[in-house]
Each structure stands twice: as C-alpha cells, then as structure tokens.
C-alpha cells in the first residue's frame, strides 16, 4: 500500500463518521417514552393505532374544520360525535402536556406549534398560582411565554 | 434497455418487502438482519475499495490540468488549475468536493445549421448540487432517530428544513429539492440521444433506488403514517446492538428501510463509490511537479546502457582510423592521453 499513513487516517475518518450512531450511543441506557394515559377513560376519539400514527393529521383536520368551515363537531369512524377542541376536549382526558404530549414529542424531536396559541393545562395552572401573579409584570415572566406571544 | 431493467429491479424490491413483511410477517429479517448485513457490507466494502486503490501504484504525476503550471518566475501561473504543492492540491480538491467546480465548467455541444456550437451549460451543475446537498442534509436529519436527546445542531437543521410550516407534519424543503435533482438527472439521460446511448442499467439503478428511498420516505411522513415512536425504538435498539422490532410499524417503513439497506449494500460495488473515490483520483490528488521533482517508477529494473564515452572507448581505434572526431572530455580519453604521455 502506498501513502499508508494518509490512507489509514482517511479510512479512520470515514469509519468514525459512518459509525456515529453506534459510538455516540455506546454505554448509554436506552430511553423509552412513557406517555401517561388517562385511567378513567378507555377509548379515544379513534383507535389507539390510528391515534399513534395519525393524531397530527386529525388535529390539523380539526383546525381546518373549525377555522375555515366553522364546524365544531367531529364524527368518528364509529359514528360517535365529539366536540372539536384541543384544550377542552383532548386535554379533558389527557390532563398533562408534560406527561402526555411531550413524552413522545421530545423523544423524536417533534416540535408541534399547537401551544403557541393554545394554552396547556400546566400553563393554565401556573397562571392561577400566587407566584405567577406576583411576577406577571416582570420580564422574566414574559420570557417564559411561547414565541408567538412576544 | 437499462432503464427498464433498473425499474423492474426497484419494483421487485417493493414487492419483496410487501410480501416479506406485509404478508409473511418477517419483521425481524427486514427490520434487523438485512439492515445490519447491509451496513457492514457498506463499511467493509468501502474500506476494501480504498485499500485496493491505495495498493495501485501511481508512479507518475497524471494530474488533469487546464492552466499554466509553475515555471519561470515571470510566467504567470494558475495554482488552482495546475497545483504545484499539497496545499494547492487540497484547495483544488476542496472546491471540487464542496462546489463541484469541474461540473461548473460543463459545456454542451450542439449543431445549429451547419455549425457546431459549444455553449455554457450549468444545469447539470445546479441540479447535481441540489441533489447532493439535499441528500446530505437528509442524511444528517435522520440522526434524530439515532440519538436521545437529539443534538441541538440536528434539531435545528430539522426545524430549518421544515420552516415553511406546510402541512402537518411539516413538509421538508430538501424533500422537494432532492426530487427535483433526481428528476433532472434521470430526464437528462433520457432526453439526450448521445447520453441515452451510453447510459447503462448501473446508471439508472442508483437513481431509481434513491427515488424509491425518497418517495417511500415522503409517503411515510405525509400519507401512509407510521408510528414514529415505534420506528425510533427500533433504530435505537439497532444502534444499542439489542435489536427488537416493536409491533405495529407500517409496511411502508420496511420498504423505506429496505431501500436504504439495498443502497448501502450496493454502494461499494457501484458508481456510488465516487463518494470516497473522488478523494483518491490520481488525476486530482497529485501535485503537478514533474518538471521540478524526479518521480521514479518503483518497479523499474536497473537499465543496462553504455554512455557515449564507454562506446567511444570500445571503438576508439576504428574511430581514429576513419578520422572521426574524438570527444576529448571523456575520462577514458584523458586516461589514454596520460598513459601516452607517461610512455
């Protein structure tokens, strides 16, 4: 082999780049998301499989129906009707954004912008507390709001 | 025809996965074994190719140049087109790899009336850049399935790529750009009769495989949704070497995975190996210094030859007799003169 030193350095750089997923995870424990499911309700508006894969499309459809068509009733595949509302209907059962939505969204680095306009249950709780009322006029408080509020 | 053969191959890929996963339920084979085999084929195959290239002797400087080489100090030279030292070689290589400089010079020949006309033709360069950079960004983006927490850089790249906020999940700009690039590279081969004539199945197959990869990815993200958390659990289990396939991931994901596996396994054996080959091209990675340095062929046998002086010494008498001029500077002649003087 000619230029052995250079060639080995080149192969080394290539192997390091290509095997990044392997060595960067070496020795790290595998993380599994555990979204907290509501205990008192057994069924969502659609099947579990559908909601896992397609919930974002459903929510987008809901937004379209409400905003463009002023249609606030959703009829699911079984023919049951549900009022269309993220804050009042979805979050009625899934009471925590942190323990439900964020679990998987953080895991796969998805950044839905639902909460730029909607108010999460945690945020609502924060508003009612005494601490938040004290610092409501400070800059610190406003910097905690989502980007769209600035 | 090559394109038809390549198309049949790619359709067969889809059918194999559809039957294997969708009908026969071979999730472990298509989700774990084939990706592992493909990855290690890729890794070992690429290293093997590089070592094979490095074992081929390149005794002489065979640089492709298109500029004035280093010469006398008052001759204006072109360091990029005719690099003289390793730094200039590195500079030229950088521009080639990052900006596809030689493609930018691409010309197109056309017969107009009775004249052959050469004109600037930058489209190939433009779409090649679009294709390669989109593919690279898409590759980096996918790192979000192989890390937790996802690095800020990768996360930022994802959000930047999706910043148009079209649809939900957001549409990626690079998805459209890579399709545009691929389509141009494919149509180019079909539209030009000269190019169509020299295009082989091995030219179309990589294009179609990447088409299959991109289209299955777009379908999976926007149309036939899959459980993306399950997908990440699978990819993370692969990189932790404790593979397990979660239930309920759609077949479209396995088609996508099979396309990338096939592409990885095909890489070292195909033209795609130019990914590393560009760095090992002797026409690009050597300095054009033949005039300044002597490069000796390493397998040269010691040559048997006589110098003029030795030749003259053998035929000295005959040369003198026939009145030929004698080279007086030869050491042998000086020896003779000395010997004659001593007598």
Image (spheres, coloured by chain):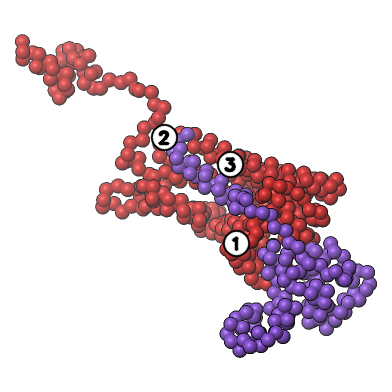
- In the rendered view, would you say B163 is above or below A30? below
Q: Which mark is residue B59?
A: 2
Report which residue position mark 3 lands on. B46
At horizontal 46% and vertical 53% (from top left) the residue drawn is B94
Q: Is residue A63 above or below residue B198?
A: below
Residue A108 tag number: none
Q: For the residues marked 1 and 2, what is the alpha-carbon distance in whole angstroms?
A: 45 Å
**Residue B232: % across, % down:** 71, 57
Residue to which mark 1 is pinned: B151
Whether residue B10 is visible, yes or no, is: no
Residue B77 in view here: yes
- Lateral position of residue A46 relative to residue B92, left or right: right
Chain shown in red: B
Disc 2 secondary structure class: loop
In which image quadrant can residue B314 be found? top left
Q: Are marks 1 and 3 in contact (CB under 8 Å)?
A: no
Quarter of the image where the N terminus of chain B is located? top right
Chain ID at mark 1: B
Q: Note whether A26 is above or below B171 in the view shown.
A: above
Do the residues at discs 3 and 2 belong to one chain? yes
Instruction: Tell me which numbered mark, 3 or 2, is placed earlier along the sequence.
Output: 3
Quadrant of the frame with the C terminus of chain B:
top left
Which residue is drawn at the image coordinates 70% and 84% (left, top)? A129
């Amino acid at each position: 082999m000619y230029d052995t030193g250079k060639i080995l350095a080149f192969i080394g750089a290539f192997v390091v780049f290509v095997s990044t997923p392997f060595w960067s995870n070496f020795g790290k424990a595998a993380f599994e998301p555990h979204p907290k499911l509501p205990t008192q309700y057994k069924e969502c508006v659609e099947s579990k499989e559908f909601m896992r894969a397609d919930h974002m499309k459903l929510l987008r459809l809901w937004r379209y129906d409400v905003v463009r068509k002023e249609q606030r009733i959703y009829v699911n595949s079984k023919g049951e009707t549900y009022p269309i509302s993220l804050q009042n209907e979805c979050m009625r059962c899934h009471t925590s954004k942190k323990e439900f939505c964020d679990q998987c969204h953080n895991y796969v680095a998805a950044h839905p912008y639902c909460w730029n306009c909607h108010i999460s249950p945690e945020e609502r709780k924060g508003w009612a507390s005494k601490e938040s009322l004290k610092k409501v006029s400070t800059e610190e408080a406003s910097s905690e709001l989502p980007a769209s509020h600035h | 025809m090559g394109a038809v053969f390549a198309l049949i191959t790619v359709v067969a890929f889809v059918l194999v996965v559809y039957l294997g996963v969708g009908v026969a339920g071979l999730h472990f084979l298509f989700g774990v074994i084939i990706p592992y085999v493909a990855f290690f084929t890729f890794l070992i195959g690429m290293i093997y190719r590089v070592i094979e290239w490095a074992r081929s002797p390149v005794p002489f400087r065979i640089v492709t140049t298109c500029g004035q080489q280093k010469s006398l100090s008052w001759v204006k030279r072109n360091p990029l087109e005719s690099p003289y030292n390793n730094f200039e070689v590195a500079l030229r290589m950088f521009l080639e790899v990052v900006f596809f400089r030689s493609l930018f010079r691409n010309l197109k020949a056309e017969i107009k009336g009775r004249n052959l006309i050469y004109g600037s033709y930058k489209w190939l360069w433009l779409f090649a850049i679009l294709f390669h950079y989109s593919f690279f960004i898409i590759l980096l983006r996918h790192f979000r399935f192989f890390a937790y927490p996802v690095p800020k850089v990768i996360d930022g790249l994802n959000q930047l790529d999706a910043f148009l906020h079209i649809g939900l999940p957001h549409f990626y700009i690079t998805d459209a750009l890579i399709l545009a690039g691929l389509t141009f590279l494919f149509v180019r081969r079909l539209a030009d009769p000269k190019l169509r004539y020299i295009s082989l199945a091995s030219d179309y197959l990589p294009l179609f495989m990447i088409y299959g990869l991109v289209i299955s990815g777009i379908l999976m993200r926007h149309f036939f949704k899959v459980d993306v958390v399950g997908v990440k659990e699978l990819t993370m289990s692969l990189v932790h070497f404790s593979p397990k396939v979660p239930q309920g991931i759609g077949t479209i994901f396995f088609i996508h995975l099979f396309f990338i596996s096939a592409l990885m396994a095909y890489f070292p054996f195909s033209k795609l190996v130019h990914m590393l080959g560009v760095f090992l091209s002797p026409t690009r990675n050597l300095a054009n210094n033949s005039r300044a340095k002597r490069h000796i062929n390493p397998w040269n046998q010691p040559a048997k030859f006589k110098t003029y002086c030795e030749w003259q010494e053998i035929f000295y008498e005959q040369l003198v007799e026939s009145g030929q001029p004698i080279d007086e500077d030869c050491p042998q002649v000086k020896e003779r003169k000395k010997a004659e003087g001593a007598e």
